[in-house]
Amino acid sequence: MIDKDRIPQHIAIIMDGNGRWAEARGLNRSRGHQAGAESVDKITSECARLGVKFLTLYTFSTENWNRPAAEVDAIMKLLLSNLVEETFMNNNVRLRIVGDRSRVSENVIQAVEEMEERTAQNDRMTLVLAFSYSSRWEITDAMRKIAARVKAGTLCPDDINEHTVAQELDSSFAPDPELIIRTGGEQRISNFLLWQSAYSELYFTPTFWPDFNEQSLHAAIEDYQHRERRFGKTSAQVNNL
């Protein structure tokens, strides 16, 4: 049973297994992405209902640009078709995008930015789509911004600290995720939120993303709630013993 007083405020999910889900059924991989989009709707609604404040979904990595052109095109079309304003408004959810927008087509960026603007006042939950994203890209981009500030004379190198780096990240508006879920059976982070996940709890499940439902989400949260988060301290310190 979920303890509603201990719901993680930020959950991040690596949505893996769409293609394998489709191939196991003799379907085109694009059908798997379509089925995965339905899971996005279900999990977004359930996270908002539970009181999660930030939900970050690893939607498309910078490495995914190397996939077959037909599959990339199908994912782009799915993104556009799922930017339905009513979905965000009915759940009072704000949309934010993080990632390298320079590689994304103008029509996709325009649609995304319009939805970001339309939902900017929604405050029940923020849905963050990590799109054309990788953590190495994000950290490298932050280093460029810091270097520019140093060059301009507005930042002294001796004053650079963890906070300086964190505030220059593309996802700086969101707190670090308490829980990172990866579906599909693989047990790796795959260049996702490397800076932010320093003390995140990791949860791996063999369930392919299209089959990941509300009950699957509850199981992940229950597992998280049974863990002791020490942040480098001892168990006695955490429990004030």
Image: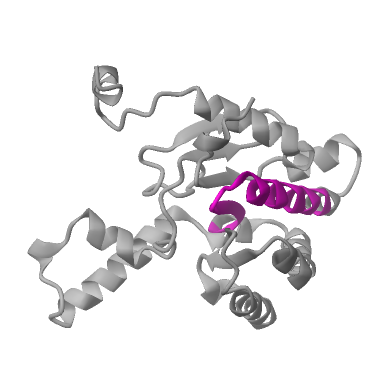
When asked about the image quadrant of residue 104, the answer is bottom right
Nearest the viewer among 84 and 209 is 84
Would residue 165 appear left or right of 20 to someone viewing this image? left
166 relative to 32, above or below: below
Identify the residue shown where x is 75% and y is 44%: 18
Identify the residue shown where x is 71% and y is 51%: 45
Residue 142 appears in the rendering? yes
171 relative to 223, above or below: below
Estimate the x, y position of residue 90 in percent, counting from the top left.
74, 64
43 drawn magenta = yes
Q: Which residues are magenta?
A: 34-62
Quarter holding the C terminus is top left
Identify the residue shown where x is 57% and y is 74%: 120
97 drawn magenta = no
Estimate the x, y position of residue 22 in percent, counting from the top left.
84, 42
Would residue 30 appear left or right of 197 to someone viewing this image? right
Furthest toward the right, the residue is 26
Identify the residue shown where x is 60% and y is 67%: 95
Estimate the x, y position of residue 218 in percent, counting from the top left.
66, 32
Estimate the x, y position of residue 93 in percent, counting from the top left.
64, 63
Residue 204 appears in the rendering? no
Would residue 9 appear left or right of 83 to someone viewing this image? left
Nearest the viewer among 68 and 158 is 158
How is the structure coloured here?
A: one colour
Quarter holding the N terminus is top right
Q: What is the number of callouts on the image?
A: 0
Task: Considering the whole magenta stretch, tell me its main secondary structure.
Answer: helix
